[in-house]
Amino acid sequence: MEMAERDQALTDPKAVFAALAEILYSAADSAEVYSAICSAAVELISGCDHASLMLRRGNTNVTVAASDEIAEYADDLERATGEGPCIDALDTEAPQLESDLRTPNQWPEFARKVVAETPIRGSMGFRLMVDRQKFGALNLFSDTPGAFTETVADHAIMLASFASVAVTALNRGEDADSLRRGLASSREIGQAVGLLMALHRVSDDEAFDILVRTSQNMNVKIAELARKVIVQHRSTLD
């Protein structure tokens, strides 16, 4: 990357979405895209040890991808108890954040079971929107109490907004060029701003400032991850 391009990338949130898009271009089908999103969460989000993607299909919430069996089981516990970060994220605008599930929290039954039966100690959930409709949620889990903070959630919001765009593109059957344009549009960046406003209870201008700072912190790492995913995918084709 030339110096001028690097300087632009570190100051423009669009660059983060463009870098994330490279992950999609390495995927052959929707299952690979969903799996790539979960893998990206574990790689990119500090403290994230497990991730899942849950989509709403009719009256059922279906896990379409997970980073591992622990994430899958956590989703099973959410469905069994009827509560948890992903379920709440599907129904509310605000991102869901519980840094220590061992303490009193908004999901007592889910927390009791997940702490007793898995290594998970913290969780976050972020709603995904498709054509302005609630469509799914990105679920993140940490094995370390207190690892998930609002700063970490800011980074996760970038990925969740990207995931919304990716799922939208898949739902519409759009090609890579259409997706690239969508990822660079102000509407998709607006999704991230909206989530940041809900998380921090700030104005849109303040949320955009947070978005820019988060972009600066994340871009290089995301670009490295995108290259890694592409290389791995190409190696499987050789």
Image (spheres, grey):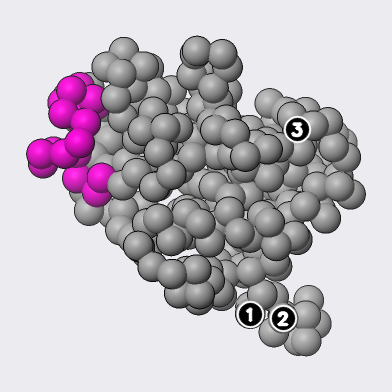
**Vertical order, 109 against 42 (above or below):** above
Amino acid type at mark 2: Gln
Left or right: 26 in relation to 165: right
Real-space Cα distance between discs 3 and 1?
A: 29 Å
Cβ atoms under marks 2 and 1 closer than 8 Å: yes
Residue carrying label 2: 8
Q: Which badge, 3 or 2, comes first in the chain's sequence?
A: 2
Question: Residue 58: image x %, image y %?
Answer: 56, 13
Real-space Cα distance between discs 2 and 1?
A: 5 Å
Residue carrying label 1: 11
Q: Which residues are magenta?
A: 98-114
Amino acid type at mark 1: Thr
Residue carrying label 3: 170
Which disc, if any, is residue 129?
A: none
In magenta segment, residue 101: yes
**Vertical order, 125 against 91 (above or below):** below
Q: Pointer 3: residues within 10 angstroms few (<14), some, or many (20+)? A: some
Q: On the image, which quarter does residue 34 sit in? A: top right
Residue at coordinates 54% horizontally, 47% vertically from top-left?
A: 160
Residue at coordinates 75% horizontally, 32% vertically from top-left?
A: 170
Q: Secondary structure at mark 3?
A: helix
